Image (cartoon, rainbow, N blue to C red):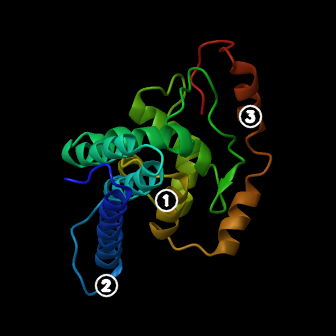
């Protein structure tokens, strides 16, 4: 505190913050991945928020050290912001939402009144229909589903093949998980399917949904007429 304008003091303080953060990262990773340690269930969203709360002060401290060589006052401001970030409970959610908006657009629900969901022929983890089902599920949760319907016959085709229910699928998507995490969840739940079985099933759907694709094409940017769309 007596040498707040001294770059040596700023560097030592910043390195201490970085060491603490790196230690916390290791501890959290170890606890989450050690099978001998029982942990409470945690959603992917909560996991990301936890890591954000640890990583943000590390990045801030590194930036403060570098900036301190040119502007010690600005460096102290950055340290202060990092402290406030850890004190304010809502700060993690704000940063999390900002990161999702700019760096993880697949986590955001589409407004299906203004744009179509992804093609039924697109695949995720080998599953046709899955990307489209995800889009409609997220939009349903967000209230932006428009004229589309989640758990329609197309979605039920996917759910029936994999032996999963729409309810648990929706609950998992509501956790704010990414496409990749949803693909893994589908793979791990319901009936066990080999890669070859999934590919054969997806290949068998080729050409069956051309009408749906055409409806998407003619309905946007505006709907040609009001109707329920699969």
Label 3 Cα neighbours within 10 Å, binned few <14 / some 14-19 / many ≥20 = some
Helix, strand or loop at mark 1? helix
Which residue matches tag 1? Answer: 181
In the rendered view, would you say 201 is above or below 141? Answer: below
Label 2 Cα neighbours within 10 Å, binned few <14 / some 14-19 / many ≥20 = few
Q: Position of residue 124 (x, y in %)?
A: 63, 56
Q: Position of residue 200 (x, y in %)?
A: 73, 66
Between marks 3 and 2 in the image, the one whose residue lies nearer the viewer: 2
Residue that extends furthest to the bottom in the rendered view of this protein: 36
In the rendered view, would you say 50 is above or below 38? Answer: above
Helix, strand or loop at mark 3? helix
Q: Earlier in the sequence, mark 2 or mark 1?
A: 2
Q: Quadrant of the C terminus?
A: top right
Residue at (35% x, 75% y) in the render: 26
Label 1 Cα neighbours within 10 Å, binned few <14 / some 14-19 / many ≥20 = some
**120 left or right, relative to 152:** right
Q: Position of residue 207 (x, y in %)?
A: 80, 46
Helix, strand or loop at mark 2? loop
Q: Position of residue 193 (x, y in %)?
A: 58, 72
Residue at (43% x, 57% y) in the render: 62
Q: Earlier in the sequence, mark 3 or mark 2?
A: 2
**Which of the 4 image quadrants contains residue 12?**
bottom left
Which residue matches tag 3? Answer: 213
**151 left or right, relative to 218:** left
**33 left or right, relative to 106:** left
Which residue matches tag 2? Answer: 35
In the rendered view, would you say 204 is above or below 209? Answer: below
The answer to which of 103 and 134 lies nearer the viewer is: 103
In the rendered view, would you say 202 is above or below 38? Answer: above
The Cα–Cα distance between marks 3 and 2, rounded to whole angstroms, is 46 Å
């Amino acid at each position: 505190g007596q040498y707040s304008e001294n770059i040596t003091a700023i560097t030592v303080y910043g390195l201490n913050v970085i060491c603490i953060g790196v230690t916390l990262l290791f501890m959290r990773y170890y606890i989450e991945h050690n099978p001998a340690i029982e942990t409470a269930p945690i959603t992917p969203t909560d996991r990301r928020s936890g890591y954000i709360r640890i990583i943000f002060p590390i990045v801030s401290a590194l930036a403060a050290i570098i900036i301190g060589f040119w502007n010690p006052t600005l460096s102290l401001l950055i340290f202060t912001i990092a402290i406030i970030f850890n004190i304010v409970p809502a700060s993690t959610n704000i940063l999390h939402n900002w990161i999702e908006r700019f760096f993880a657009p697949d986590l955001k629900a589409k407004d299906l009144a203004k744009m179509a969901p992804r093609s039924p022929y697109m695949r995720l983890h080998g599953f046709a229909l899955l990307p489209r089902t995800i889009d409609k599920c997220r939009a349903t949760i967000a209230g932006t589903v428009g004229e589309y319907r989640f758990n329609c016959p197309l979605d039920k085709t996917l759910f029936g093949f994999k032996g999963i229910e729409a309810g648990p699928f929706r609950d998992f998507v509501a956790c704010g998980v990414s496409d990749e995490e949803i693909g893994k969840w589908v793979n791990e739940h319901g009936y066990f399917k080999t890669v070859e079985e999934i590919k054969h099933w997806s290949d068998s759907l080729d050409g069956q949904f051309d009408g749906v694709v055409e409806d998407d094409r003619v309905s946007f940017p505006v709907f040609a007429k009001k109707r329920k769309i699969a």
